[in-house]
Amino acid sequence: MNSRIFKTGMPAVLFAAFSFILFLGSCQDDVSNVGGSLAGNEVTITVDSLAMQIEHSTVYEPVYNARSTTKLLGRISVPQYGDLDCSFVTELMCATKMGIPDSITVNDIDSMRLMLSVPRGSLTGDSLAPQQLKVFRLTKRLPADITNEFDPAGYYDPSRPLGVRSYTLSAIASGDTAFMQDQYIRIPVMMPKKFATDSFEAYRNNNPIFQWPQSFAQAFPGLYIEQNFGNGCVGSITGVQAFTYWHRTEMRYEKDPASETGAYHYVPYTVRDSVCLFASQPEVISSNMIKFRISESIRKLVAEKKSVVTTPGGYYVKIKFPARQIIEKYKDDLYRLSVVSRLSFQIPGHEIKNDFGIGVVPTLLMVKTSEREKFFNENKIPDGKTSFTATYNATTGTYSFNNLRDYIISMIDKGEGITEDDIDFSLVPVVISTEDVSSYYGNSTTYVTRCAPYIGRPTMTLLDLDKTVVAFTFSSQIID
């Protein structure tokens, strides 16, 4: 334990103090008497950092909600991680209107391509690994309670793919400009010409199915995209868009190179354009189908009572938060009046060595175990009372939950009424979406808008819960 106490003469008003984290070791309390002769009362600010061994267990979760705006596609086999096989299904949103000039007819429609977009670097494995995918049209609506174990059999016709495409997730074959500037690897998949012309004519005839997402989903339930061939790479697909391509003739007034007098004439040019009519969006169902066979090395760590967190799916960790021990320390240092200023909880996290660059999970959610499923089912965000988040700090190699003040105050108020449910928490990998809102005065505030299970890419993290640090700060006043 390491604690410091600061004393200063002040009016008899308690205040919240700036706090800081002190690490392992023990030292003599530092006391400042500046201003001591000006007032008879003293306010002390106490900062305690407690090194603790947390009671913990690793939990295997084979079935989970795999709905996500990020789709995983591909296969990898990593001795330290395991075998991962990813495909996905998605409904599509349609444009309510087709942005094609009225002068364009169905005879001017060239093709339709399904464009899959992978942000550069958003992959695990070898970007040059040859792969192949198949795209199928779904024949019925996806279930609302879809999970990672969803079986597409019966939802599509395997003998009638809409498109097949061989690809790699490398930009090395792109032109110089695209290689330097394009932020995405694009995988274009040619769709049947009839799909393009039928869609065009349906829009031209003002078919009512495009007016509402539900009516469109009844007519076109969505797509199943299957990894057909290849091993060694998994990509994170953030965009699925269907573009319709067409051409038109444009007359340009140019100088006639054959004219001796320099006369001008009109020259016909074929101009090509495209419009996105269908796309996967957050408003519709989009779910990953993930098969993850965990490696023997990870299973061995779990058998040795180590705390391991993996994604997508696999393991998460349950802990007993040391609220009772913290409150005991609070009572030991209690004078006559005390105000809790801050409570933070720091967990060391380590990479598990591997040859595929699989790192740690970026963000952890600490949520009461009894509320874990409800948290995700109801699309909640961390409230700082029963749920908290921490982002991995690569410099310190830790996850720091810094906003536990309201939680510990509620536990102090409970006194002897603290139950096991109050201290039973789960550590779950999540992805956080935020939004910055500017005020009239130019100040910007960041709000968390979404907190969902992390399915962005494979990760594996070893949490060292025997070396956690709890930093507890409170101020106390002695009244003469």
Image (cartoon, rainbow, N blue to C red):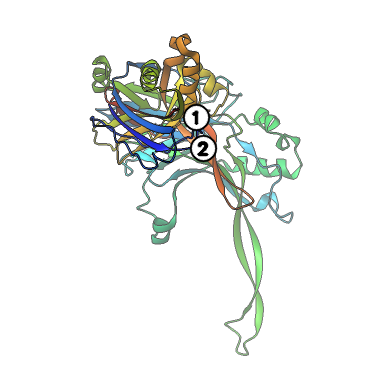
Q: Are marks 1 and 2 in contact (CB under 8 Å)?
A: yes
Q: Mark 2 highlights which residue?
A: 433
Residue drawn 67% across the image and 51% down it = 107
- Residue 178 picture location, percent across and down: 43, 57
- C-alpha separation, residue under disc 1 versus residue under disc 2: 9 Å
3 vs 236, left or right, is: left
Could you say which quadrant of the image residue 193 lies in?
Answer: top right
Q: Mark 1 highlights which residue?
A: 452
**Element at label 2:** strand
Is there any visible trace of residue 397 in the rendered image?
yes
- The vertical placement of 252 against 332, above or below, is below
Q: Nearer the viewer, residue 456 or 333?
A: 333
Residue type at mark 2 is Ser
- Residue 412 picture location, percent across and down: 47, 18
Nearest to N terminus: mark 1 or mark 2: 2
**Element at label 1:** strand
